[in-house]
Image: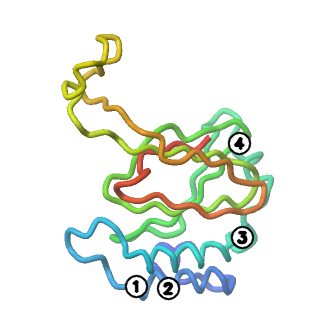
Amino acid sequence: AAEAAAAGKVPDGASPALRTLFDFLRDAPPLSDGQATCPPSFAAAVRQRLDNIFAADLCIAMDAAKRLPSAGSPVGYLEIHAGPEMTLCIFVLRRGAQIPLHDHPNMHVFGRLLFGRMRVRSFDPDLADATAHPCRAQSQRLRPGACWASLRQDAELGPAPATYDLGPRSGNVHELV
């Protein structure tokens, strides 16, 4: 089954909801060159299919975080599919664990909380040069490579399953807490 998923095929015995998601993504046309965002209708269709995915569809139990090695990372990772256009994976976080602030440049991110609670905070970077803000005090100036950002979303998800998405240019800088 793992080999089939890695090859982009629906694993034998996959739930109807998972099969529907895989078939849709497999048959979707690739984004055109230079198109960093997917069309709104495609994004809505992905969200709709993700809304029908539950932990049982992925054979993930609520106690999965308890099975993470105690000396290891508080975050587990399971790859479901990896291809040139998309990666589908599962993160398992222990209570209190987080995935720190990061981005996926020019990628649309779709996520689904399967159980528990999670806070998704996303930001839009202000890419204007820090020197464009001369009124800021010296203490507010940034180190090279850093930038100011505006909060885009601060959402508490759970305990019911919930789908979320982040655009390639809006809210892409995010953390999961």
Instruction: Give percent across and percent down for residue 119.
Output: 64, 45
Binning the other alpha carbons within 10 Å of mark 3 as few (below 14), some (14 to 19) or many (20 upward) gives some
Of circles 3 and 4, the one toward us is 3
Instruction: Give percent across and percent down for residue 157.
Output: 69, 53
Residue 161 vertical placement versus 95 (above, below): below
Residue at image position (29%, 65%) is 36
Instruction: Give percent across and percent down for residue 172.
Output: 41, 51
Could you tell me the amino acid type at mark 3? Phe
Q: In the rendered image, which residue does mark 3 sit on?
A: 54
Residue at image position (44%, 84%) is 26
Label at residue 67: none
Tell me, yes or no, whether the two marked residues, 3 and 4, touch with CB atoms within 8 Å. Answer: no
Q: In the rendered image, which residue does mark 2 sit on?
A: 24
Could you tell me the amino acid type at mark 2? Phe
Q: Nearer the viewer, residue 16 or 4?
A: 16
Instruction: Give percent across and percent down for residue 1.
Output: 59, 77
Q: Earlier in the sequence, mark 3 or mark 2?
A: 2
Tell me, yes or no, whether the two marked residues, 1 and 4, touch with CB atoms within 8 Å. Answer: no
Q: CA distance from mark 2 to mark 4?
A: 31 Å
